Image (cartoon, rainbow, N blue to C red):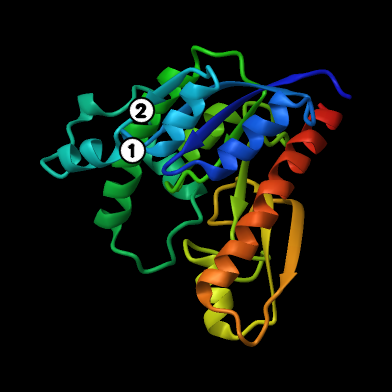
Amino acid sequence: MAKKINVGTLISGGGTNLQAIIDAAKSSRISADIVFTGSDNPGVRGLERAQNAKIDTFVVDYSKIIQSCKKGIKGADLPKDFDLEDIRAKQRLFKAGMPSEQVEFFLKSRAIAEKALLDQIREYDMDLLVLAGFMRVLTPYFIDRINTVSGKHRIMNIHPALLPSFPGTDGYGDTFRYGCKIGGCTVHFIDYGEDTGPIIGQKAFEIEDTDTLDDVKRKGLEKEWGLYPLCIQKFADSF
C-alpha cells in the first residue's frame, strides 16, 4: 500500500459515498485517513456518519449565506483576495449571453461561502479534497486556493453518468430519459467547468427494458460505492 494521504470530504446529504470511503479507510483498503467532513447543509445524515466514525465535522450554511447576499453585497463582505475580473475570465460555468449581473452575483456570493469553507479547511493538513455528494458548484476562487501547484489537481468529484455524456445535476435521470441501455458513473478532477475535469475512473452497468429510474439510480449508487475508493487509492499511489 502507498503512504497514507490525508483526505478531506465535503457532502450535502445522506453521505452514502462518504460511508463507502469511511469503510474503505477503516478496513485499510485505501491508504487514506479522513481528516474532516464538511457540509453546506446543517443536520444531514452524512454528518452523523462522520461523527460516528470520529471524524471532525463542520457546516458552512450556503443557503443562509446566499439569502444574506440577496439583501446586498458590500465590498467588505468579499474576501480580501477576491478578484472578480480574474474569476469571471477563468470560469466556464456560464454560456455567453448570460446577464452580467447574474454572473457577478453568483461569483460574489459563492466566493463569500467558499471563503468560509476555506477557513475551515485550512485548519487541517489535507492532500486531497473529495466531494462525496457535495451539491454546490465550486468557482475558480475556491479551486485556485486548493490547487496551488500548476497542473496538479487536488479536488475529486463523482458524477452520476458516463462523462462526457450527461453533465449536470441529474445524470442518472438524463441517462434514463434518453433511453440509454448502458449507464454508469464517473470520478473526475474538478476544473473551471461543469463536470469537465480529467476523468480518473468509470464504472458502467446495463439498463434493462424493464428498469425504472429508481432501478437505474440503485445500480449507479452500487457502482459509485466501489469506484470512489478505487480512485482515491489511485491518487494515493501516485502521490
Residue at the image point whose x is 65% and y is 82% from the top: 180
List x then y, in percent, for residue 55: 53, 19
Question: Within the image, what quadrant is residue 44 found in?
Answer: top left
Q: Please give the residue where the numbered disc 1 appears in the rendered image.
A: 41
Q: Which residue is mark 2?
A: 59
Query: Along the horizontal axis of the image, is 68 left or right of 145?
Result: left
Mark 1: give few (<14), some (14-19) or many (20+) Cα within 10 Å: many
**Compared to 87, does 207 lie above or below?**
below
Instruction: Tell which of 232 and 120 is nearer to you.
Output: 232
Q: Quadrant of the C terminus?
A: top right
Q: Secondary structure at mark 2?
A: strand
Please give the name of the residue rendered at 61% of the width and 13% of the height, measured from the top-left corner. Answer: 125
Quadrant where the N terminus is found in the figure: top right
For the residues labelled 2 and 1, the Cα–Cα distance comes to 7 Å
Front-most of 19 and 174?
A: 19
Is label 2 in contact with label 1 (beta carbons under 8 Å)? Answer: yes
Q: Nearer the viewer, residue 227 or 62?
A: 227
For residue 77, say whether it is visible.
yes
Percent across and percent down for residue 87 are: 44, 42
Sequence-wise, the earlier of marks 2 and 1 is 1
Residue type at numbered disc 1: Asn
Image: 56 above or below 163: above
Residue that sits furthest to the left in the current view: 71
> Residue 114: x, y in percent?
39, 32
Q: Residue at x 73, y 21 (%)?
A: 5
Element at label 1: loop
Q: Residues within 10 Å of mark 2 (few under 14, many from 20)?
A: many
